[in-house]
Amino acid sequence: MSGTDTILLFSYGTLQQEDVQVASFGRRLAGAADAMPGYRQDMLEITDPEVIRTSGKRFHPVVTESGNPADEVPGTLFEITPAELAAADAYEVSDYKRVSVRLKSGVDAWVYVKA
């Protein structure tokens, strides 16, 4: 990590969208490609009108542990601030929970998985 107040957040879904980043964080995030081994992705219907308006999508991806190390969910690793992590927590609906996951690159990052 580049600083003590830098937090790593992995996104496989709508937080990768520039419009969602600007609405949630007030800026476009710079990120690097990474992946979550041992997880699989499904789709989840979102009912929160604010989240649908922000993302432009009624169905969002959601991941769960598969137990199969060959499974992998691609996405983007971002460096964010503690305030931006709080904003991401506010954006995510209750169907998601934030957990720490070891990514394919070997770093640990926060990610939102199925609650």
Image (cartoon, rainbow, N blue to C red):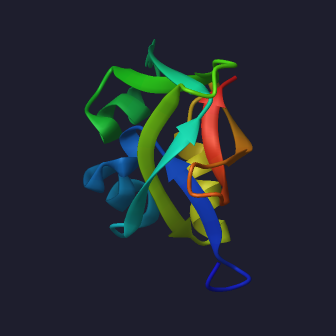
- At horizontal 37% and vertical 40% (from top left) the residue drawn is 14
**Residue 1 at x, y = what percent?**
65, 78
Residue toward you, 64 or 19: 64
Q: On the rendered structure, is 65 left or right of 74? A: right
**Residue 41 at x, y = what percent?**
48, 22
Quarter holding residue 28:
bottom left
Q: On the rendered structure, is 74 left or right of 102? A: left
Q: On the rendered structure, is 99 left or right of 83? A: right
- At horizontal 57% and vertical 30% (from top left) the residue drawn is 93
**Residue 21 at x, y = what percent?**
37, 57
Residue toward you, 106 or 47: 106
On screen, 68 above or below 89? above
- At horizontal 62% and vertical 22% (from top left) the residue drawn is 64
- At horizontal 73% and vertical 41% (from top left) the residue drawn is 99
On screen, 40 above or below 7? above
Residue toward you, 106 or 93: 106
